[in-house]
Amino acid sequence: MLSKSIEQSNLFSMDKYIKDLIHLYENKKLPNKIILTGESGIGKSVLAFHLINYIFSKNEDYAYDKNNFRINVLNKSFNLVKNNSHPNFYFSYIDEDKKSINVNQIRDIISFCNKSSFNNCEKIVLIDKIEYLNKNASNALLKILEEPNEKVIFILIKDSAKFLLKTINSRCISFNINLNHAQKEFILNNILENDFYENLNVDFKNFYFSPGDFVNLYYLFVNNNIEYQFTIEQFLDYLIKNKLYKKDPFIKNNMNLFFELYFSKKFFMHKNNISAFNNYKVFTKELNDIYKYNLDLESVLIRFEKICINEK
């Protein structure tokens, strides 16, 4: 499944980054091995797809609008990339049901790189969540990065909070992507409908969430008829009672963030709340163990609801 980021035809709050990348490309100085690194969900893959469309569409009808940072949805290459059928494009990522990017995926990339390019144009390999490479995959990728085909551009996307082998980092040029709070809010107000962010309960407006997290949160609220004004307590109670954590990977993968919101509110309201502090230590440790050892999430959430949400 191709990333939903390709569907974002407008690029918001990243003028500087796309301008710099286009300038490098136009002056034949764009490195053929780059890493876009930054906070998870900040829009790195959206930026990557805009750069990819600029490169592929430069001699086509409905070319990339570099003045307004916009992809024309009528462009041939845009639709080929969107359908994952562009002959000069290869996209690799971690499957939702997998824990890592495996060596077979890198072997497929190597095979793609060794084939002749269509129309003798550049080929682009995009790897999302590069930090999830397993050991064998990392070693296989390292080999091709050391001796890349001149016609191939590698764009690697990495969460700045995660670890990546120094040997891979050292063979690429990193572009650090950062957005301030105002830029993030501008993105949300432009890509989300129904004034979601403005109407969202203040409990959720915090530095923990990236624009991508808020987009996922929006669809979670809409698809499950959750009120925008739900407090964090009401939200957690609702998702536990309705077992939404079994249906939505976003919830399961971000339960630690929801716990942070809940306990941060408790600490703010009662700075000397010893009970809340003790519960915070217990439940955050248990969550970490769940993610680390793939343990049962349900039992922890049921106890959390009984001890914390339903406390008198």
Image (tube, rainbow, N blue to C red):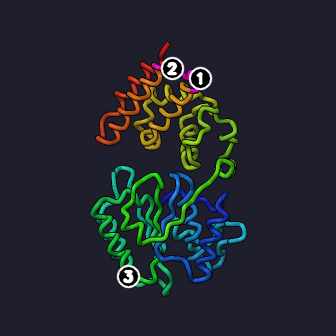
Q: Give yes or no for contact between labels 2 and 3 (Cβ–Cβ under 8 Å).
A: no
Question: Would you say residue 269 sits in the magenta stretch?
Answer: yes
Q: Is residue 54 left or right of residue 1?
A: right
Q: Is residue 179 left or right of residue 2?
A: right
| Quarter holding residue 165 | bottom left
Measuring 38% from the left and 64% from the top, which residue is drawn there? 166
Q: What stretch is highlighted in magenta?
A: 268-274
Query: Dot 3: what SS?
Result: loop
**Residue 265 location (% of width, % of height):** 56, 28
Residue topped by disc 2:
273
**Residue 260 location (% of width, % of height):** 50, 34
Q: Nearer the viewer, residue 17 or 238?
A: 17
- Please say whether residue 88 is visible from this viewpoint: no
**Residue 81 location (% of width, % of height):** 51, 69
Measuring 46% from the left and 65% from the top, which residue is drawn there? 156
Question: Would you say residue 44 sits in the magenta stretch?
Answer: no
Residue 268 higher or lower than 93, as above or below? above
Q: Give yes or no for contact between labels 2 and 1 (Cβ–Cβ under 8 Å).
A: yes
